[in-house]
Image: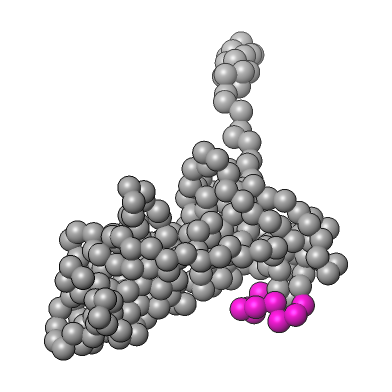
Amino acid sequence: MRPLVCATAAALALSAFTAPAQAASSAYGYAWSDGKGHLRIVPKTATRLTRQGNVLHRLKTLSGAKELRLDYTGAAYARVTVACDLKETEGQVALDAKGLGRTACAPAHLRASLGRGPVPVRVEHRGGKATRVNEILVADWPGGRSATGTLKRVNDTTVVFATGGKKIKLGYSYSTVFYRTTARCGDGWLTGRPVNADRNGLGKKQCTWTDLTKALKGTRHPVLVKIDYTPGVDSLDQVWEVFGDA
């Protein structure tokens, strides 16, 4: 019996020093796709308000908040739409009393949602993994801005925009418009003839977000651009290639 007693005592002693399970945390914000099975989100403050009988959220910048990158492949996902495969609410919403989406869906549906652009959510997470993601409805979508600066690729849906001594990480998707100075959408950055530029040197040839991805992959250094973007959401809405030093 003595070996059993010793083993039991050792197990109890070990359990006394075992670190407690990491507590779950939650964050509100705009989720962006960040590689296969991952999302990124900058936590924001969230205030609930009622509008036309629905609970909405007003999201604002949270001072000192750091971006989170989370694996969502095992997360429960709940949408504000009445069906998982809808792109829009189409006038019908599925919200609980706290304004959280309540239509139970799968991680594959979250992947599809992220593929369409930023998703306002409340996400519960632990140890770098999202455990639950609920869509929310935002009360006010922030207004857009225009700026000139340089753009540098991070990945196929993310860039860093630098202007006035500041750097902003921006996401983009199928809705992003890319105006080129090149003859063809698939040309390298500032290559090819004839030049499609206005008197200010801004590109005039309308192309797509996939053309932007391809063009940026061929660059080694930050490139000069004019952009329209949405602060808060950190969405890259339009990009103009700039010809020469115009």
- State whether residue 186 is above or below residue 96: below
Residue at the image position 72 percent from the left and 51 percent from the top: 47
The residue lying furthest to the top in this view is: 2
- State whether residue 91 is above or below residue 145: below
Q: Main secondary structure of the magenta part?
A: loop
Horizontally, residue 81 falls left or right of residue 116, namely: right
Residue 120 vs residue 246, the one in the foreground: 246
Instruction: Please identify the quadrant where the C terminus is shown.
Output: bottom left
Residue at the image position 25 percent from the left and 80 percent from the top: 199
In the image, the segment drawn in magenta is 84-92
- State whether residue 69 is above or below residue 90: above
Residue 115 vs residue 5, the one in the foreground: 115
- State whether residue 22 is above or below residue 199: above
Q: Position of residue 179 (x, y in %)?
A: 32, 79
Corner quadrant of residue 139: bottom right
Q: Position of residue 164 (x, y in %)?
A: 34, 51
Q: Position of residue 93 (x, y in %)?
A: 76, 73
Instruction: Please identify the quadrant where the N terminus is shown.
Output: top right
> According to the image, what is the colour scheme of the structure?
one colour
Residue at the image position 81 percent from the left and 61 percent from the top: 50
Is 111 part of what is drawn in magenta?
no
One can see residue 113 in this view? yes
Q: Position of residue 23 (x, y in %)?
A: 63, 36
One can see residue 32 in this view? no
Residue 123 vs residue 180, the one in the foreground: 180
Residue at the image position 59 percent from the left and 15 percent from the top: 13
Horizontally, residue 125 falls left or right of residue 205, namely: right
